[in-house]
Image (cartoon, helix red, strand yellow):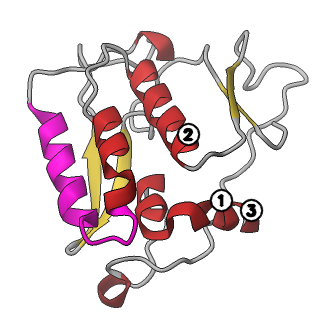
Amino acid sequence: MTAGQWTWEAHENYQKGGWRNRCRIATANGPLLLSVPLEGGKHQQMPIRDVRISYRTDWQRQHEQSIRSAYGRAPYFEYYADAVLAAATAHTELLWDYNWLLSTTVIELLSLDVELDTTERFCAGSAGATPFPKPVPTPPYPQLFEDRHGFLSQLSILDALFCLGPELPLLLHQR
């Protein structure tokens, strides 16, 4: 991966328990896990691009309410909320498309010079493949509920987006 390019593994199988359909946000009561429900139960051997989202419950309304409640007083919520919530409540059939929409929305909001791309074949573990880098801890930044819970790491990018706004790319460069 070069600066300005983000390549998604498009040929892996969905891994249950991963982060493809989840994110953590900070709330007044501590971290909250938001989960996108999936169709069909077990997806362990299903290609990531075929995983379907379930709309049997009104999870999008619940997620929107949780995001509004958690970040409604964040410094940049008013500036970014409409676009983020429009993407978060969009009705996509596939998890892949939902994640792509959310990612491109954040990239556009921050005017980041990042090109999203996909792999042409499965790369992880193949001969000569470069192993995925370990996640780099996020440098601390001011968070809404830091006085109650201290700095919370491993949160969705929404936390930094609503708390830092256009300063978020500076934080990303500190990593």
Q: Residue furthest front?
A: 79
Disc 1 + disc 3, Cβ < 8 Å: yes
Residue 15 seen by the camera? no
Return the residue at label 2. Answer: 108
Q: First in sequence: mark 2 or mark 1?
A: 2
> Is residue 3 at all visible to an observer of this figure?
yes
Q: What kind of residue is marked 3?
A: His
Label 2 close to label 3 by CB (< 8 Å): no
Label 2: element kind: helix
Does residue 5 belong to the magenta stretch? no
In the rendered image, which residue does mark 1 sit on? 169
State whether residue 119 is above or below residue 131: above
Q: Which residue is mark 3?
A: 173
Question: Can you give x and y, in whole percent of width and height, for residue 102 in the image?
Answer: 44, 35
The quadrant holding residue 173 is: bottom right
- Frontmost residue, 126 versus 119: 119
Residue 83 percent coordinates (x, y):
36, 41
Identify the residue shown where x is 38% and y is 83%.
Answer: 146
Q: Is residue 151 above or below residue 130?
A: below
